[in-house]
């Protein structure tokens, strides 16, 4: 795939700020399935170190709220400034996805990269916590690290080379996620598909120089990507 927007960020920046498979490429592919106009107010949920927020603000013209639990919003704000973005274009905040401090109907859209599986496995999450914050007709787009087929009862050795069964419990296949997301009222599942850039995004990640990427290398090199995918989800609030 071509990633003109993702690749507009220096590789050193991508490597320094990624927290998993290349979030810039995942985000650019995910947004190719979206219909979000420039100027839209978008929640980047679980934004990590702000790469995808900067991408969406600078390259797509969205007003982005970068909400994350573990990252430092001041650090993210310095990064946005380095990208030439003001606090009217990219707004960093520390927030828990289960207690987001926004009015109902505030967002035109939600984008979540490599994060929804931390809080969204609770099937009441979407309807109780996230959907009310989105305008009627608004889109929600998730890129979720998943499994080609759930294999929790018989985990292959290549997955166990880097992860415990408890960590692998965060990953599920498309039918599991469809059943989970179908529990919410007032939402249309517009599209779910395997993302094309999974192998490329993982290849970029395991080249990163941090202990998490180093830890993930053994599984990838042992063949984990035969069992793992990335699931793109497009929802619309009714
Ligand atoms: C694997 S990182 C991905 C970060 C970023 N989207 C990226 O791709 O680099 C998962 C992110 O989910 C966030 N997260 C986990 N639980 C959360 C919660 N309850 N509320 C908000 N963010 C949460 C963490 O803070 C972390 O930054």
Image (cartoon, helix red, strand yellow):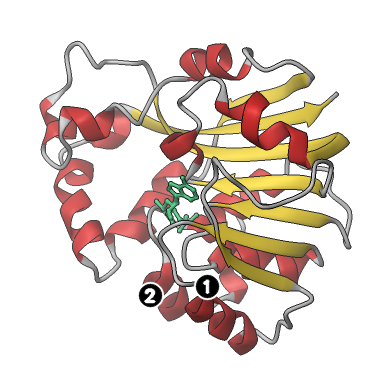
Residue positioned 82% across, 49% down in the render: 106
Residue 215 screen position, x and y as percent: 17, 54
Dot 1 or dot 2: first in sequence order is 2
Q: Is residue 74 visible?
A: yes
Left or right of 104 in this view: 196:
left
In this view of the protein, which residue sits in the foreground, 173 or 186? Answer: 186
In this view of the protein, which residue sits in the foreground, 192 or 66? Answer: 66
Residue corresponding to mark 2 = 16
User: How far, Cα to Cα, is label 1 from label 2?
Assistant: 16 Å
Q: Is residue 202 above or below residue 133?
A: below
Residue 227 screen position, x and y as percent: 30, 26
* Residue density around tag 1, few if under 14, some if 14–19, many if 20 or more, within 10 Å: many
Residue 134 screen position, x and y as percent: 79, 40
Q: Secondary structure at mark 1?
A: helix
Residue corresponding to mark 1 = 73
Quadrant housing the C terminus: top right
* Residue density around tag 2, few if under 14, some if 14–19, many if 20 or more, within 10 Å: few
Q: Is mark 1 within 8 Å of ligand 1?
A: no
In this view of the protein, which residue sits in the foreground, 171 or 28? Answer: 171
Left or right of 223 in this view: 111:
right
Residue positioned 53% across, 20% down in the render: 123
């Amino acid at each position: 795939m071509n990633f003109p927007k993702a690749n507009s960020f220096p590789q050193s920046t991508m490597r320094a700020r990624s927290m998993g498979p290349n979030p810039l490429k995942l985000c650019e592919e995910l947004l190719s399935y979206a219909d979000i106009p420039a100027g839209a107010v978008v929640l980047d949920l679980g934004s990590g170190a702000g790469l995808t927020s900067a991408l969406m603000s600078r390259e797509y013209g969205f007003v982005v709220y970068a909400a994350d639990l573990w990252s430092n919003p001041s650090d993210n704000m310095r990064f946005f400034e380095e990208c030439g973005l003001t606090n009217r274009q990219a707004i960093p905040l520390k927030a828990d996805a289960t207690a987001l401090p926004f009015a109902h109907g505030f967002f035109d859209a939600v984008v979540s990269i490599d994060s929804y599986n931390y809080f969204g496995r609770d099937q009441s999450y979407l309807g109780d916590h996230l959907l009310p914050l989105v305008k009627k007709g608004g889109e929600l787009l998730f890129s979720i690290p998943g499994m080609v087929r759930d294999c929790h009862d018989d985990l292959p050795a290549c997955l166990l080379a880097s992860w415990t069964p408890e960590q692998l419990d965060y990953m599920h296949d498309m039918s599991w996620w469809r059943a989970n997301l179908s529990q919410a009222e007032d939402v249309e599942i517009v599209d779910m598909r395997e993302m094309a850039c999974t192998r490329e995004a993982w290849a970029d990640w395991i080249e990163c120089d941090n202990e998490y990427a180093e830890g993930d290398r053994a599984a990838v090199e042992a063949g984990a990507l035969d069992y793992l995918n990335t699931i793109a989800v497009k929802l619309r609030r009714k």
